[in-house]
């Protein structure tokens, strides 16, 4: 019996030792004026949420520093299902976490020039009509701006990849994909009002359905997108097989393609 008690005591001691203390844990800190909740991370702070009643008309300006340290990130789900109508993100922030502003009432979002990544569903289910992606951003993740009211977007010169569903369900009528972008994910611009698309020369991969459910009439495209062996449903509507044959049937011909009178044609100088 004594051996059994001694054995259980050793297990308890090991468990306590493995847990350690909480002296190294950075507890959340709430700014008493703004209600913004911060958590220390390395040499800066991550915004993790907001304390305060949910009501209409919250205009949120995130500062570039807190307690003398830079604010470097917006955490995952930080403002999920809140009631923000406008948000300004400072240049000190480098990343916007997954679902950070999902399901708010945002009509305006100013993204600082230090942001390098915009996470999955970061601005999903809002009412944004315009967004400028700064040149510092390298990737726009899946669903980042899905289900908004976007009419205008500007994609910065640093963006290399646009994730699947990134701009799905919006009101875009035209879009320019700059040369620095190499990949466009599946359904990225599905279900908009696009009539014209300019696809940069750097794009080599376009996912299935990227431009589906759009009344496309004009597509400008470089010669680097490989669709020769693509057996998928295509980038857009049921006219896809004709476009594909015209573009890649003779070796991926760069140019401007126009759809009129139930046919795609390639414009020549």
Image (tube, rainbow, N blue to C red):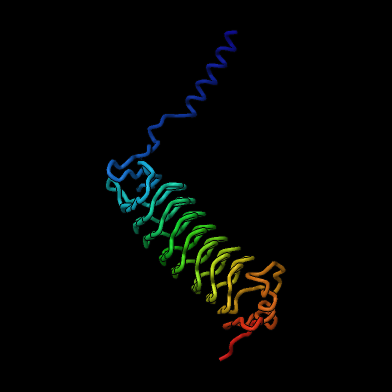
Q: In which quarter of the image is the C terminus?
A: bottom right
Q: In which quarter of the image is residue 156?
A: bottom left
Q: Indicate the quadrant where residue 11 lies.
A: top right
Q: Is residue 221 visible?
A: no
Q: Eyeballing the image, is 101 above or below 175? A: above
Residue ranking furthest to the bottom: 269
In the image, residue 63 lies at what x, y percent? 31, 52
Viewer-proximal residue among 38 and 143? 143
**Residue depicted at 60% across the width and 8% down the height:** 1
Residue with the most extreme top position: 1
- Horizontally, residue 37 falls left or right of residue 230, namely left
The answer to whether residue 82 is left or right of residue 213 is left
Q: Residue at x 59, y 12 (%)?
A: 4
Q: Where is residue 147 in the image (x, y as percent from the top left)?
A: 51, 58
Q: Decide which of 237, 8 is in the foreground and name it.
A: 237
The percent position of residue 44, horizontal first and vertical second, equals 35, 48
Q: Give how far across and how far down residue 248 sits, in percent.
A: 67, 79
Q: Which of 211 and 21 is in front in this view?
A: 211
Residue 193 to residue 266: above or below: above
- Going 62% across and 83% down the picture, which residue do you hit? 260
In this rendering, the count of numbered labels is: 0
**Can residue 74 be spotted in the picture?**
yes
Which of 100/213 is in front? 213
Q: In this view, does 12 lie above or below 88?
A: above
């Amino acid at each position: 019996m004594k051996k059994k008690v001694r054995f259980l005591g050793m297990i308890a001691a090991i468990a306590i030792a493995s847990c350690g203390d909480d002296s190294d844990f950075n507890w959340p800190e709430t700014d008493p004026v703004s209600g913004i909740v911060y958590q220390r991370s390395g040499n800066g702070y991550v915004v993790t949420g907001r304390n305060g009643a949910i009501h209409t008309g919250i205009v949120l300006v995130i500062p570039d520093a807190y307690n003398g340290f830079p604010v470097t990130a917006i955490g995952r789900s930080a403002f999920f299902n809140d009631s923000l109508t406008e948000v300004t993100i400072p240049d000190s922030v480098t990343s916007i976490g997954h679902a950070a502003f999902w399901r708010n009432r945002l009509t305006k979002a100013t993204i600082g020039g230090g942001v390098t990544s915009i996470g999955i569903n970061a601005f999903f289910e809002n009412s944004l009509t315009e967004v400028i992606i700064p040149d510092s951003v390298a990737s726009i993740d899946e669903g980042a701006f899905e289900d908004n009211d976007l009419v205008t977007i500007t994609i910065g010169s640093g963006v290399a990849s646009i994730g699947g569903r990134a701009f799905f369900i919006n009101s875009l009528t035209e879009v320019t994909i700059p040369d620095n972008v190499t990949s466009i994910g599946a359904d990225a611009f599905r279900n908009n009002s696009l009539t014209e698309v300019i696809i940069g020369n750097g794009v080599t991969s376009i996912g299935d359905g990227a431009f589906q459910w759009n009344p496309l009439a004009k597509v400008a495209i470089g010669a680097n997108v490989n669709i020769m062996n693509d057996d998928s449903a295509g980038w857009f509507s049921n006219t896809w097989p004709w476009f594909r044959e015209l573009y890649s049937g003779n070796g991926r011909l760069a140019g401007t393609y126009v759809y009129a009178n139930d046919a795609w044609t390639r414009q020549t100088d």
